[in-house]
Amino acid sequence: MVDLHHHLLPGIDDGSPDLETSIAMARMAAGEGITHVVATPHASSRYTFSPALIAERLAQLRAALDERGVPLTLATGCDFHVNFENIRDALDNPRKYTLNATEYLLVELPDLAISPHLGETLYELRLAGMAPILTHPERNPTLQRDSERLKDWLRHGLLVQVTAGSVLGQMGKAAERMAHRLLANRWVHFLATDAHDLKFRPPQMRQAHAMVAERYGAEYADLICTGNPLDVFEGRELGEQEEPLHLYSDELAGQPWWKRIFARDKE
């Protein structure tokens, strides 16, 4: 499995506080069957995003894992908070914040007061060569109350990542209900841990993968835990996806949905 959202780097944000914790988190991830991790520190008003510091901590962690024989392939990206300064900088530097220097960008929304112009912002990011991936919408109180905006963003090409803990009911009942609604509708493209520590938000995916496989099919579970995230990790366009339910009207159903999305960008 491939984990695209993981606060693994030591001493960067509210994730791992030190190298030993990062090593233990990496061991736990590998024990879960995770083979690739993108370390995604926050880029927010609270946490300064420093590519130089991130590269330094990545090299330190890679060396420590190699020395201890922990079989984990690492890359970096960020947990990109939507604010004016970040958006301006990302538009000027399209690969600064993306996952493994690909086109894919993890985007985190504020819990409250989502801008009515967010759709335009997502479109701007796409025009600048980035493919936004919305992180854990199932945990966002605004979207929990009203997911119609999410439906519109999906129609226009937004990709969605759900947290493994939400699937298991570890992030609250509202998040659990919404996570399973999104999965049932095939609106989820990636499952990730959003790991911050070893106890409360650990790097575990195996149980969530098993639940998705049991309820929604093994192929879908493999797609969102391995196939799609590996495509992102390696910078490829996503392959064939399962057709989403309750998203497009009948008159738009002439070709596979992901081709409709990418064709729209080229018009």
Image: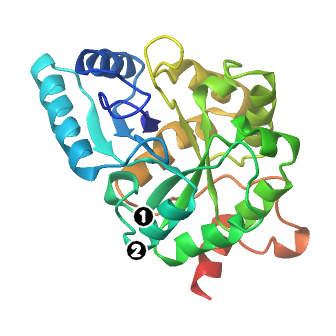
* Quadrant of the image containing the C terminus: bottom right
Q: Amino acid at mark 2?
A: Asp
Q: Which mark is residue 39?
A: none
Callout 1: few (<14), some (14-19), or many (20+) C-alpha neighbours within 10 Å? many
What residue sits right under mark 1 in the picture? 103
Q: Residue furthest bottom?
A: 267
Callout 2: few (<14), some (14-19), or many (20+) C-alpha neighbours within 10 Å? few
Q: CA distance from mark 1 to mark 2?
A: 14 Å
What residue sits right under mark 2 in the picture? 92
Whether residue 175 sits left or right of residue 202 in the image: it is: right
Tell me if residue 207 comes above or below residue 195 in the rendering: above
Q: Nearer the viewer, residue 126 or 218?
A: 126
Whether residue 95 sits left or right of residue 216 in the image: it is: left
Q: How is the image coloured?
A: rainbow
Give the residue at x 78% y 75%. Answer: 254
* Quadrant of the image containing the N terminus: top left
Whether residue 5 sits left or right of residue 183 in the image: it is: left
Measuring from the top left, give residue 105's x and y in whole percent. 48, 57
